[in-house]
Image (cartoon, rainbow, N blue to C red):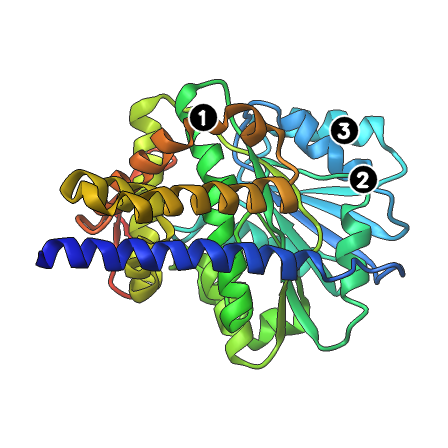
Amino acid sequence: MALTLVLAALVTGAAVYCVLTLVAARRYLAVAPPETPGPGISVLKPLHGSEPRLYENLRSFFEQDYADFEILFAVNRLDDAAVPVVERLRAAFPQVAARLIETGPAPYANDKVFKLDRMRAAARYDLLVMSDSDIRMERDALARIGGEFNDPALGMATCPYRAAPGGTFWSLLEALGLNTQFLGGVLVARMLEGMRFALGPTIAARKPVLSAIGGLDALKDYLAEDFVMGNRAAALGHGVILSSCVIEHHIGGQGFRNNLMHRLRWCRSTRRSRPYGYLGEIFTMPLPLALALWAWAPAWWHLVAATCVLRALSAWACAGWVLRDPLTARYWWLLPLQDLLAFAVWCAGFFGNTIVWRGRRYRLQRDGTFEAL
């Protein structure tokens, strides 16, 4: 009976969380996007080798309908495989101000932060849009982001993203999870406590705000530098928002083992960055909890059935209302498998303190910093 009551309490909490997701999605959509142009923007793109769809991803930034912007690219060496792609785009769009910076090898573990810091120093404009190489934007993306920064109290904005899978079944499952589960947690956190973090794929920030948090160099030892960046900005009283601009995140097409290691790296990083929040993620997994309750105490099937319905509604609120994601509409029947896999990886994330990133092994420290092994 004790285990039954514990499981029932967890399932009830997860059901309540699903309801909160519905409310949070509606509140996010209720904020009208900006209509007036914003300030000049420097787009910062750290690159590391070639990757599938790199040309299409980068091209979307050259095609922006925005009056005043530049694009900066950074590579460690000019023989990087991404350089020919950049040069091809610079030749195709001569009207776009685009520069390529050779940074040399990073002196610390987080190579991305090193490249961003070098580009920040060379950027022409005060407003920086830091965006990963696997991001694709609609033509009005910079207009939306720039317009939001007409508010002088706004110091940082982070973009929700619609995950697009690579060519494997496992990346498809991961994309479904990102579009239905991960975003739900972001929306609920935004509603309950405001944005006190940022999401790594695309972050917009004013230069003075970055200086106030100690500069990008202060983030060099953190794996989850995006979370720390937003958290420090919010702690100093700078406005942080979840932007009205939804971007597209083209995740890698790894096989089972590499995808599992990628998920595990993310879980271990989250556990180190915000341990209590990681523990609370149990409530974001209603389906595995409901199935466990059903298997242990079938008489509670009413609660199980209601929770499964709420999980479906929550998934649609995120993927359908907010992201307008065709992937979830097509593969919704795979969500139970994705939820069970996500639960298993979440459990595994409580153990171990090493990760593999870009082929190298690192050790995660308790404070969220990491070091190469």
- Residue ID at (87%, 48%): 66
Q: Position of residue 281 (x, y in %)?
A: 34, 55
Give residue 301's mark. Answer: none
Measured as percent of width and height from the top left, residue 108 is found at 39, 53
Residue occupied by mark 1: 333
Mark 2 to mark 1 CA distance (whole Å): 32 Å
Residue 132 seen in this snapshot = no
Residue 131: percent from left, percent from top: 62, 47
Visible residue check, residue 330: yes
Crowd tier of the residue under label 2, counting other residues whose Cα lies within 10 Å: few below 14, some 14–19, many 20 or above: some
Q: Is residue 188 left or right of residue 239?
A: left
Label 1: state its secondary structure.
helix
Mark 2 sits on what residue?
Answer: 139
Residue 273 lies in quadrant: bottom left
Amino acid type, callout 3: Leu
* Amino acid at circle 2: Arg
Q: Earlier in the sequence, mark 3 or mark 2?
A: 3
